[in-house]
Image: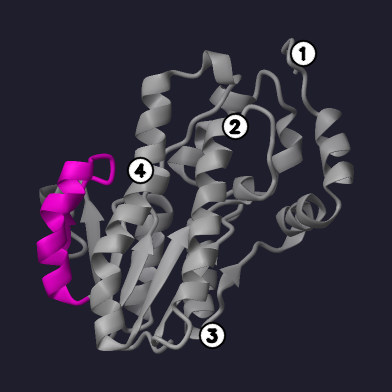
Amino acid sequence: MKIQGAKVLVTGGNRGIGLAMARAFREAGADVWVGVRDAKAMTEFPAIALDMGSRDAIERAALELQAMEFDILVNNAGLLTGGLLEDQSVEEIYAMLQVNLLGVIQLTHALLPGMVKRGRGKIVNNSSVSGVMNFPLASTYSASKSGVYAFTQCLAQELRGTGVSTLVMVTPGVKTRMFDEIPKKYGAKLDLKLIEGAISAEEWAREVVHAVEDDREVLEPKGFSGLGVFLARHTPGVFNRLVATKYRRDGLF
């Protein structure tokens, strides 16, 4: 898809991967807007108040967003949960599912009809290697990212011939504030050497932009993370045995 001159909305564009993608799309010639909870705090890009953690907030923003006729929607905003299921807060689980999955579906539902009517557009959704590689302690987060992956793949089929397409990012470990939370939620029971090799947000953002330009439907990581995705998808027994050697429910790590 041609990015030069395209109008792009990036959710969660105030930091991390979202901010890096906003900058990468701008460098590629796009007109970039970011959706953030506090629009007044964003000075680098035009901002729209958009709290992906609130169904009502998304609904309130929908009319304004529809009128702006975005060519590319990047559903990036996300929250991390982790730990044994029984130790996770139900309130945190609900909040995470709203941001990671329900908000993605709701915002796409609001903007997609306009794209289809105009006969052009791209929906870019941020899934994760956790949506394919199902680690212990990641049950709820993995569920949300598996849902994003499935949702995007279904949309890809629905949109054939409309001029609108999709891209799902199978995002690896990226050096962000969220990535820094992983040791707190997983480190006591999971050997985190299993997920070493995080890349910079800028590097991943460039890959996303290239994938949009190339009209790819899936962007998967390279290197060790790419191997892990391959094993989980094609030889799940091997993957699960490997993970079992790195996990201790009694917390020996």
Checking the image for residue 157, the label placed there is: none
Apparent side of residue 31 relative to residue 1 in the rendered image (left or right): left
Query: Mark 4 = which residue?
Result: 99
Calculate the distance from the C-alpha at mark 1 to the C-alpha at mark 4: 32 Å
Three-letter code, disc 1: Leu
Disc 3 residue type (three-letter): Asp
Figure check: 18 above or below 137: below
Q: Please state if 118 lies on the left or on the right of 234 as rendered.
A: left
- Residue at disc 1, secondary structure: loop
Q: Position of residue 149 (x, y in %)?
A: 55, 57
Q: Disc 2 residue type?
A: Ser
Q: Which residue is drawn at 20% across and 50% down?
A: 58
Mark 1 sits on what residue? 252
* Circle 1 or circle 3, nearest the eye: 3
**Cβ atoms under marks 4 and 2 closer than 8 Å:** no
The residue that mark 2 highlights is 139
- Provide residue 233's location: percent of width, then percent of height: 76, 55
Q: How far apart are marks 3 and 2 (CA)?
A: 33 Å
Quick one: label 1 or label 4, which is nearer the N terminus? Answer: 4
92 or 19, which lies in front?
Answer: 92
Residue 153 lies in what quarter of the image?
A: bottom right
The magenta region covers 47-69
Mark in front: 1 vs 4: 4
Report the Cα–Cα distance between label 1 and label 2. 20 Å
**In the image: residue 233, left or right of residue 95:** right
Q: Mark 3 points at which residue?
A: 214
Q: Where is residue 108 in the image (x, y as percent from the top left)?
A: 32, 62
Magenta: predominant secondary structure element? helix
